[in-house]
């Protein structure tokens, strides 16, 4: 799987800065991967112009993309995402492993986190206000993730994103704020069935706190 080429194609098409990239999959090998691209930008809610009426713009919705190529280890997903994040100048990749949220006693916050990880945002408005969905199995994957557990990765691009303007570039970044492959950081094996968080450090940042 080649996340980098797909992300670069989307960035060239949308022509807006990327705030973050998240990728979610059910805690089972060889299931589709759901990538959500979060853009920085605004658009008018309607082309209608009314004299004396100020219609505020809305944030550009995120893009949901489904990757259905076969894969057989979670380390392979880690490696592909590390490669994409490295080339896009990200400072880190975070991997979160979450348990099923349909078990007895699971707090409501876990169910909300699961829905959001799969791009299902609670809102009274239309779904396309927050997400341009081209992932045909997204809802089915969300239901399976809720019952089996899921993994979620996230990184913030510097090249083609916002973060290059907010922090000092580290020595690994090229003049375009990206990096040349290959990524030198190896994948770490997951602890199967154990919820947890793994952070891959890709570069040094000295003047911005991401959390």
Image (spheres, rainbow, N blue to C red):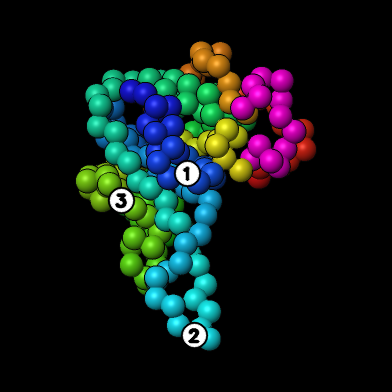
Of residue 209 and residue 51, the one placed in the foreground of this image is 51
Q: Nearer the viewer, mark 3 or mark 2?
A: 2
Could you tell me what secondary structure mostly forms the magenta stretch?
A: loop
Q: Position of residue 164 (x, y in %)?
A: 66, 37
- Residue beneath disc 3: 133
Vertical position of residue 124 compared to residue 101: above or below: below
Q: Nearer the viewer, mark 2 or mark 1?
A: 2
Vertical position of residue 62 compared to residue 75: above or below: below
Q: Nearer the viewer, mark 3 or mark 1?
A: 1
Decide which of tag 3 and tag 1 comes sooner along the chain. 1
Residue 167 in magenta stretch = yes
Q: Secondary structure at mark 2?
A: loop
- Residue beneath disc 1: 15
Vertical position of residue 140 compared to residue 201: above or below: below
> Which residues make up the magenta segment?
163-176
Q: Secondary structure at mark 3?
A: strand
> Which part of the image, by quadrant, shows the N terminus?
top left
């Amino acid at each position: 799987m080649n996340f980098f080429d797909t992300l670069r194609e989307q960035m060239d098409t949308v022509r807006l800065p990327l705030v973050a990239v998240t990728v979610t999959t059910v805690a089972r090998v060889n299931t589709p991967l759901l990538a959500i691209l979060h853009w920085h930008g605004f658009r008018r809610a309607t082309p209608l112009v009314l004299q004396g009426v100020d219609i505020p713009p809305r944030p550009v919705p995120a893009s949901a993309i489904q990757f259905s190529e076969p894969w057989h280890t979670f380390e392979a997903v880690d490696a592909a995402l590390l490669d994409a994040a490295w080339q896009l100048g990200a400072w880190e990749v975070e991997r979160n492993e979450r348990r099923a949220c349909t078990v007895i006693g699971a707090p409501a916050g876990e169910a909300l986190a699961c829905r959001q990880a799969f791009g299902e945002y609670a809102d009274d408005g239309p779904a396309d206000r927050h997400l341009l969905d081209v992932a045909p199995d997204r809802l089915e994957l969300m239901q399976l993730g809720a019952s089996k557990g899921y993994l979620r990765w996230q990184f913030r691009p510097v090249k083609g994103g916002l973060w290059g303007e907010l922090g000092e570039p580290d020595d690994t970044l090229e003049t375009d704020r990206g990096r040349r492959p290959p990524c030198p950081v190896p994948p770490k094996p997951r602890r199967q069935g154990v919820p947890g968080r793994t952070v891959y450090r890709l570069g040094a940042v000295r003047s911005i706190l991401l959390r």
